[in-house]
Amino acid sequence: MVALAAARNTPEKVGSERAIPLTANAKVYQGGMVQISAAGFGVAAAAAAANVTVGVARESVDNTGGANGAVSVKTRRGIYRFGNSAAGDLIARSEIGKQVYVVDDQTVAKTNNAGARPVAGICFDVDAQGVWVEFL
C-alpha cells in the first residue's frame, strides 16, 4: 500500500462493546476480565501468557457442555476497578500509567511473574479498594 493522496472513507466500529465467542466448557462471570485464548475463543481471564485480555464481561455466560463458539459473552473496554495483588506484586500509585498483569479474572499484579502473566491493561489509578485498569 501507499500513503493516501486523497480523503478516505474509513470504516468505523462505534462503541466499545463486542461479543466474544467462548471456548468449549468455559464459564465467564459478569464483571470479570475476559481474554481470548491462543485458539481464538473467549475465556475467563487467567495467568496464561498466551491469552490476550480484551475487556470486562457485561453478563455471566456458561458454555459448560457447549462447543467452541456455541455462545458468546458481551465484553466492554473502558476503565474498571479490580483487586490488587499482594506482597511484591502489590500495585502502588507509582504504577499509574504502566502495564499491569492478570492474576485471575478479578485481580491484577505489578509484574508479569517472569512472563507467566499476560497484560491486563494500563493502571489508571489506585485506591483503597483496588486498582483502576484501563482496557484499550
Image: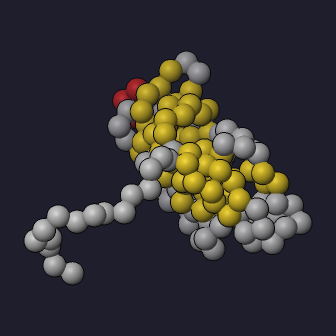
User: How far across and how far down the image is residue 23, in percent?
Assistant: 73, 66
Figure label count: 0
Tell which of 24 and 131 is nearer to you.
24
Task: Tell me, yes or no, if residue 76 can be seen here.
Answer: yes
User: How far across and how far down the image is residue 17, in percent?
Assistant: 55, 48
Q: Residue furthest left?
A: 5
Position above or below: 92 against 47: above
User: How far across and how far down the image is residue 62, in percent?
Assistant: 82, 54
Tell which of 83 and 112 is nearer to you.
83
Q: Residue furthest right?
A: 65
**Residue at 44% in and 56% down:** 13
Q: Residue furthest top?
A: 128
**Residue at 59% in and 21% down:** 129
User: How far across and how far down the image is residue 108, in percent?
Assistant: 56, 40
Position above or below: 70 against 60: below
Q: Is residue 127 left or right of residue 33?
A: left
Q: Is residue 55 left or right of residue 6?
A: right
**Residue at 76% in and 45% down:** 60
By what rule are the colours in the image chosen? secondary structure
Q: Is residue 94 left or right of residue 16?
A: left
Q: Quadrant of residue 70?
A: bottom right
Position above or below: 115 against 106: below
Position above or below: 96 against 127: below
Task: Tell me, yes or no, if residue 111 can be seen here.
Answer: no
**Residue at 42% in and 33% down:** 124
> The N terminus appears in which quarter of the rendering?
bottom left
Q: Is residue 22 left or right of residue 19?
A: right
